[in-house]
Image: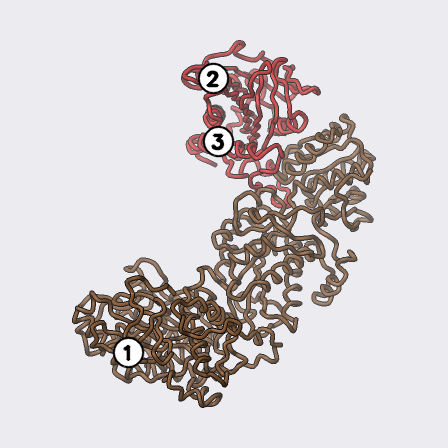
Amino acid sequence: MEPLRTSDPARLAGHRLLGRLGAGGMGVVYLGRSAGGTLVALKVIQAEYAEDPGFRERFRREADTARRMTSPWVAPLVDADPEAEQPWLATAFVPGPSLAEAVAAHGPLPAGTLRVLGARLAEALRELHAAGLVHRDVKPGNVLLALDGPRLIDFGVARDPEDTSLTSTGVVVGTPGFLSPEQARGARESGPAGDVFSLGCVLAYAATGRPPFGTGALDALLYRTAHDAPDLEGVPREIAQVVGGCLEKDPERRPTAEALARSLSAAAPASPPDPREALRAVRPEAADGPAAPHPVPGDTAPEDTAPETTAREDAAPEDAVPGDEAWLPEPLVRLIAERSAAGLALPGIDDTEIDASDATVPSPAAPEGRGAGRRRFLLLAGGAAAVAAAGGGALAVWGTPFGGGEGSGSGSAPDDSLPLYTIGLHADLSGDQKAVGRAQERGLRLAVDEFNARKDARFALAVKTADDGGDPARAPEVAKRLVADRTVLAVVGPTTDTTALASMATYDAASLPLIAVSPGATVLDVTGSRSFLHARVTDTILPFYLNAYLRGTAKSRTIGIVDDRASDTYGWEISSTLNRILRDARQPVVPKVVSALRTDFAPTLDALLDGGADSVVFAGYHDRAALLARELTRRDFPGARAAAQGVLDARFLSAAGDAAEGWAILAPVMDAATAPEAKAFAAAHRKRFDAEPERYSVETYDVAQLVLRTLGSLAVGRRTRPLLTTALRAATYKGISRNLAFDRTTGALVVDGSGIYLWKVTGGRFAYQGVAPYQVST
Amino acid sequence: MRGNTRGVRGTGVTLLVAGSLLAGCSAQGADGGAARESASPSADAGAGATAGATASPSGSSLFTADPSLVPRSAGDGAVLADAVVLAAGDWGRGFVAQRPAASTPGTWAVLDDDCRWEREKLPNGVLASSSRYSRRPAGGGKGTVRVTAATTVHASVLGADEQLSTTLEEVLRCPEQQPRSNERITGLNSLGIPFGARNQEYADDTVMETGRYVENGGAAQPYSWMVARLGTVVVAVSVTGAKGNTEQELNQVGSEALAKMLERIQLRLKGN
């Protein structure tokens, strides 16, 4: 809410003005308090328009319309004076965000909420139409969400269908994107069916986050509305047909508001009753309160659903029985609660009792001093809705059907009454590195399943996988798919350097946190991506471990380095860094760079031996490492052989055969199947998948833990992609396989010596040797 | 098969991009790899694809050489090398020949065990090598720019490719080098960019080096060495700057020269 401006009056028509709620085409809407203490939305025609008879006439009509409305789903008229010098109209204040804000902040609404929303708004329209009126501007901004149901507001352009005096031909009244085709064409005869069409648009928007005819240039939008089929992808099955019916181009083929209300109500057994009935059932005396001709939403809710309670989130799944009050997803209930707290900052309330210690727990049921208590609550409630919309990009989401879409939902079904967030996995699940990608998927799923099984889980998690086959050309499309799913708050992956590089800009543009577990290229940390987190050390760190192993453990005096140009920057990061480390330490080194075209490593070995190398580091990948391994064996090279994670691949063993024996691999990956630290993880993995954990599963499990813990540390309204990115970069987590902490600017991992492990080929397999030393022991 | 015109026209522009990437890299410090640009497709986590596996008989991914035009003898190689290498007048207005203006035929430069450059007799497998030395004299507030152009013709694609590997190896072996007794090149960084990697689409392989050049203990000047391979032919340029010339200007001088030589190779060897 904006504060009052100096030009605004302090009082108006017996109301104390507390602030500005907004300004429309023809007037300003104030938050005001009546003499009786009721908070109202006070709409006042601005002086310059009040002189225009047309506006005064429209205002009078709006007031008359509102007086005739008795639907609980319409913000009720409290008072009005169309004949005043400055005509004004007061409606009860609704303590909730608009549907537009709610969807922008929290993404698409779940099916249950949609049914209730649609049924109640249809009831509101039914009454409006029965009174011979047409709303003409049904849109998300004119639907406010309260704890007990929606409220249709703003009759600013409502008029009798027969009355054409206010609209000259060709003037579009309404909001593009939610207009009926007949309105889009500027037709005079826009009638009740136009409202039904707009309601269909509103429901589609609420279900998907997108207006069904898109956004953009007005002309194109109006054209699409008139000619194109609506975009209903993502609208839940159970209401898709009803919504589709509303969006028929031919007004005659659309259902009436009454029929719409019936069909949606029939499909919504859990929808709330008329709030007045609920009120009578719970606290009958409040219904007669003089300050509340209509109940103020929230006042009627049972204690355990009061905004400030966290009972719902803490409830065990079986306790979360959907009740009348449960029509809104938890994040929105929370949003209302948070706004209530923020509303304490309301200006101009010096004569209103506020008990700060009690402020965040307003109790409408307080028996004594009911008037004061009520004012206090109303104040809070008013402030709630008055607070300006939260920053854009908020994308927390709830209630998406589990396992929908590509059948990639996690195995354990979480309680669907909890808010649901999705962690995406962008991986190579079918290409060269599919072993790594699949292990990562299992690690992620295990963490998510364990979380969902927790009795104290305050939200539910889903996993959505997307396979790029290891192809950098496909990676951006895969990233776009995950970005488009607004339930996805973080993505783990991709699997390789090239797919990561190819897709990180897409994630960055969407501010979607991308957490890489297996890629190691340094360039990933210097592209300037704001949403990237690198959950492993770069390849330039591995040479320190290679050096420590060879000169420490293996007692090598002169290290030979073979840089394989077929591995391009991967090999070069390792070879050039190791070369520099050794030169800086004034240790002898024999570097050898091998052409990608060379398959015969004999001359390479000749050069190493000529240089006096007594050990070899291969800076390249597994296939060509096997060529060198065979040459070393053929020549009976006695020294140690070492490489980084590019050789830690079963195909090295098969290609090199016996020549693989004794090779040491320094890699940012542990053997979760045998590492003592990972014993519990391994047991859970075996139980869940009936298989040993493969490489990169526990590393991904650790990253998933980081994500879900960080997500849990954020208030519900702050569980957004950008805020999660910031929180993740600031987070620290001691995982099973490595400690996770990041540079807040680049997302690079803070190097602390953890997370690098030694493997050695023994008996034809990679035998895990545990934590690798970082420094040469003396 | 690629249109030669397109390849030639695109060359200069792409080179500039590559050159600036290298400059950005070296500016990141002496990490020798901390600022790598993106990985190439062949570097995709173990795929281990070799650049030459699918190369055409000419050894080029860029153009198809007419086999009858590819040099097989030292004589044909020398003709091609001299036709491709840039003389003073080819560098642009203001450039004049240094003394000496050209390398001794039948020799090439080799970095010895003590990191000194020596001219040695061409080994087997190298058909011809030709270097030309030019300079743009000081003037207009700018110091003297010295440039070298070199062309080496190999008997095989592998031999040509290994010349680039050797170039990278030289920097690992000798981050400081001594071109002549009174000259030092220090702080060398290098970066190989194969065809297809990081938008490099103008040569089958390239290596970029940057460092600082000091003569007679004087002020350090920017130094760059750019090498590119097309089939069996390797071309290279060095640019040593002086005050008043930005590194960007020097980089452009080198890139355009390299592009011009690559264009000459294609014009000489292209098939139908």
Label 1 and label 3: CA atoms lie apart by 66 Å
Seen in the picture, residue A489 relative to A534 is either above or below; the reply is below
Mark 1 nearby-residue class (10 Å; few <14, some 14–19, many ≥20): many
Q: Horizontally, is A92 left or right of A361 in the view? A: left
Chain under callout 1? A
Tag in front: 3 or 2:
2
The amino acid sitting under disc 2 is Gly
A775 on left or right of A447: right
Say which residue label 2 marks.
Answer: B143
Using the image, determine if residue B161 lies above or below residue A740: above
Q: In which quarter of the image is residue A143?
A: bottom left
Query: Answer yes or no: do the residues labelled 1 and 3 have beta carbons within 8 Å?
Result: no
The residue that appears at 61% across and 23% down in the rendered structure is B186
In the figure, what tint was chain B given?
Answer: red
Q: Where does label 1 land, which residue?
A: A192
Q: Do pointers 1 and 2 mark residues of a single chain?
A: no
Q: How far apart are marks 1 and 2 (CA)?
A: 82 Å
Q: Could you say whether the residue bearing mark 2 is in a helix, strand or loop? A: loop
Q: Which chain carries label 3?
A: B
Amino acid type at circle 3 is: Leu
Residue A247 lies in quadrant: bottom left
- Say the numbered circle drawn on residue B15: 3
The chain painted brown is A
Return the chain for callout 2: B
Left or right of A48 on screen, residue A530: right
User: Where does residue A138 sit, x and y in percent of width and height?
Assistant: 33, 72
Is A287 or B114 nearer to us in this picture?
A: A287
Give the CA separation, mark 3 to mark 2.
25 Å
Residue found farthest to the front: A351
Asked if the residue at tag 2 contacts the one at tag 1, i.e. Cβ–Cβ closer than 8 Å, the answer is: no
